[in-house]
Image (spheres, coloured by chain):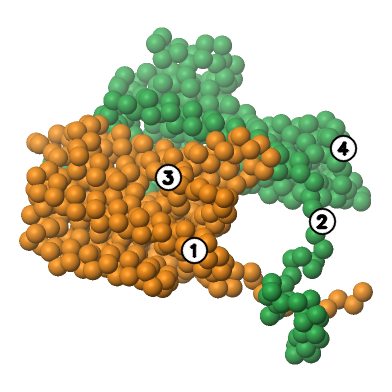
Chain colours: A green, B orange
Amino acid sequence: MNSPAGFKIVHGQVTGIDPFQAILNPSTPFETTHMILACYVTTGFGAAAVYAVGMLRGKRNDYHRKGLLLALAVGAIAIPFQIISGDFNARFLETAQPAKYAAIEGVMHSGNGEPLYIGGLADPTTGQIYYAIEIPHGESLISHFDLNSHTQGWDSFPANARPNPLPVHLSFDGMVGCGFFIFFVGIIFWLLYFKRKRRVIPTNKWLLWLIFLSGPAAFLALELGWIVTEEGRQPWIIYGYLRVQDAVNPAQWIDVSFLIFVFIYLVLGTTLTVLLLKLARQPKKILPWSEYIKVEGQDDEEEQGEQEEKQPEKVGAK
Amino acid sequence: MILDYAAVTALWLSIIVYATLGGADFGGGIWYLFTFGKRKNDQRSLIASAIGPVWEANNVWIIYLIVGLYVTFPTVSAVLATSLFIPFTLALIGIVLRGASFAFESHISEALAARAIWGQLFSTASIIAPFFFGTSAAAVASGQIRVVHGNIPVAVFSPWLTPFAIVIGLLALAICSSLAAVYLTVEAERRKDMELENAFRTRAFIALGAIAILGIVAFILASSEATILWNGLIHQALWAIIVTILLGIATAGALFFKRYKIARILIIMETGAILGTWGLAQNPYLIPPDITLTSAASPPITMQEFLISAVIGMSILVPSMWFLFHVFKGVNRTPRVHEKKVEA
C-alpha cells in the first residue's frame, strides 16, 4: 500500500499482475524488517515489565530473575537493530514517499540547512511548526550528512496529496523517543549486569521502575509507528493510485457499526482482564505426577489391583 | 476458464466445510438454548465439551473463504460487502460474541448470574450468525442484488428481508441444529449415556424434519421470488435435488436404527448436497443476474497463484485439522503415557 508494485493500470483496468512483485515491493525490506523487530522489542520489554513489577512487589525469586533476564536479552538485542532499521526506513521514505517524510520530520517549508524539529505542533492550517525544539542544521546533517543540504518541505506538495503533519510528526517523535528510552534502559541493565562479578542481575528499585516503564513505552512506540505509516500515507490508501475516500465502503452505517464494535470489544476486553486476573490470583494446585500420568491399558472401569499387576510387566517389556 | 471454475469450486468446498464444522458449533449453541429437564446441565456440558476444543479452529474456513473470494473474485466481494453490509456486520457480531461468550461462560466458576448472562449471549449469538448468513445467501440467490451500469447497491434491506430470505435463514439454522444434534448423539454414545443419546436423537429428528419442511417451502417460494435459481434448480440441478432428498431420508434412517456414526457421515453429505445444489443451480452466475463467474474473475495469473497457495495451505491445514480432531474427538481421548513405577 505504501509502494504498490506488481501491476499496471491501462485504461482503468488493472493488468500485468505479478503477485510476487506485489509482495516483494520496494517497501518490503524496510517496513517488514522494522515490524518484525518491533515484535521482538515489544514482547521482550513487555514481558520484562511484568517481571519487574513482580520484583517491585517483593517477589525476588529465581523464577522472576530468570524471566527478567531472558525477556531483557530478547528486547535489548532487538532494540539497537530496530533503531538502525528505523533510520533506514526514514532514508528510504525521503525518496519513496517525500510528503510523508516531510510530515514526519515536521519540515514545513523547503530549504537548505533545515533544522531538526523535536516535538512541536505542526499546524496544517498555517503551515508553521510551533513550540518545537530546533537543532540548527540538524535535519540536513542527519539526513544527508551535509550541513546545508536541501530538504523538501510539506507545503511543496499539493493540498490534496499531503498528510496532516500534526499527528504524523508527534507520533514519529513519540516513537523515536520511546525507542531511545527503551534502548538506554536496556544498556543500563546489561552494563550493571556485566559490571557485577557474580553475574547477578541488578535489582535496584529505580532500575526496576525504568524497566516497568519500558514495557508500556514499547507498546506505545509500536502503535505510534503504525500511526506514522498510516496517517503519513494519507490521503492515499494505495499510494499514488487510490484515495481513502474512493475506497471506503459507501454504506451509511459504517460509523454506527464502528461504535458497536468498539463497545463490544470494550466489554470483552474488560471481562477478559477480570477473568485473567482472577485466574492469575488463584493459587497454583500442586499435582503429584500420578495425576498427570495414566498407565497404559488402564481404563476408568479397571480396578486398582489390576493396574498394579500390570505395571511390572510394562517395565520389564521396555 | 478452467482456473475460474477450479477457484470457485475450492471456495464452494470451503463453504461446505465451514457449514459442516462451524455450522455444528453454531448448532451446539442453538441446542444450548433448548436444554431443559433435570439433565439440563449434563446436556450443556456435553455441548461444551464437544465444542470446546475445536470451535476456534473451525473459523479458519471462513477466513480462507473471505480471503479467497477477495483475491479471486474481487468484484463479487466488493458487491457483497457494500450491498449486504448490514447482515454481514450482524453475522460478524454474532461470531465475535459467540466465541468470546463461550470462553467466558466456561471460565466463570463462582458468579452464577454472570455465567448465565454469558451463556444466554452464547446461544443468542449462535442463532444470529447462521441466520444472517442464510438470509445473505438467499439475497444473492434470489437475484435481487442488481449491479446496473457498475453502480453497486449500498446497504440495502429489501433483498435479505424477503419471505424467501427469511425461510433460507431458518433453513440455515435447521441445518446447523441437525448437524450438531447428530454429532452430539455420537458424543453421547461414546460416553455410554443412553438418556443424552436419546435426547439428541429426538432433537436430530426434529431438526431434520425442519430441514425438509423449510426446504419444500423455500423451493415453492423460489418459483416466484428467485426465478433464476428456480430455473437453475429445475433445468440444471434436478438430479442434485433428488440426491439431497435421498441423503436426508438416509440420515433419518441411520438415526432410526441408531447407527450414529453413519448418520454423522450422511448429515455431512446432506449439508454438502444442499449447498452444492445451490451452487449448481446458480451456475454460471455468482451474483445473478448481473455478475457471472467469468465477468468477475481475476486474471489467470492470480487464479493460478491462488490455487497453488491453496494447495500449499491445505497440505498444512488439512493434516493439522485431522490431528486436532483425532486428539479431541478420536477414540483415545486421554493420551496414554508409559510409566515406570517410581521406587519410593
Name the residue at 38% across, 41% down: B128
Report whether mark 4 lies on the same chain as mark 3.
no
What residue is disc 3 on?
Answer: B126
In contact (CB < 8 Å): disc 4 and disc 1 = no
Q: How crowded is mark 1: few (under 14 residues within 10 Å), some or many (20 or more)?
A: many
What residue is disc 2 on?
Answer: A286
Report whether mark 1 lies on the same chain as mark 3.
yes
**Residue A186 percent coordinates (x, y):** 73, 40
Q: Which residue lies furthest to the top in this view?
A: A126
Image mark count:
4
What residue is disc 1 on?
Answer: B197
Q: Which mark is residue A58?
A: 4
Q: Quick one: label 1 or label 3, which is nearer the N terminus?
A: 3
Q: Quick one: label 4 or label 2, which is nearer the N terminus?
A: 4
Foreground mark, 4 or 3, reads: 3
**Residue B155 percent coordinates (x, y):** 25, 31
Distance from the alpha carbon under mark 4 to that under mark 2: 22 Å
Name the residue at 78% across, 36% down: A53
Q: Which image quarter is the N terminus of chain B in? A: bottom left
Q: Is residue A159 above or below residue B167?
A: above
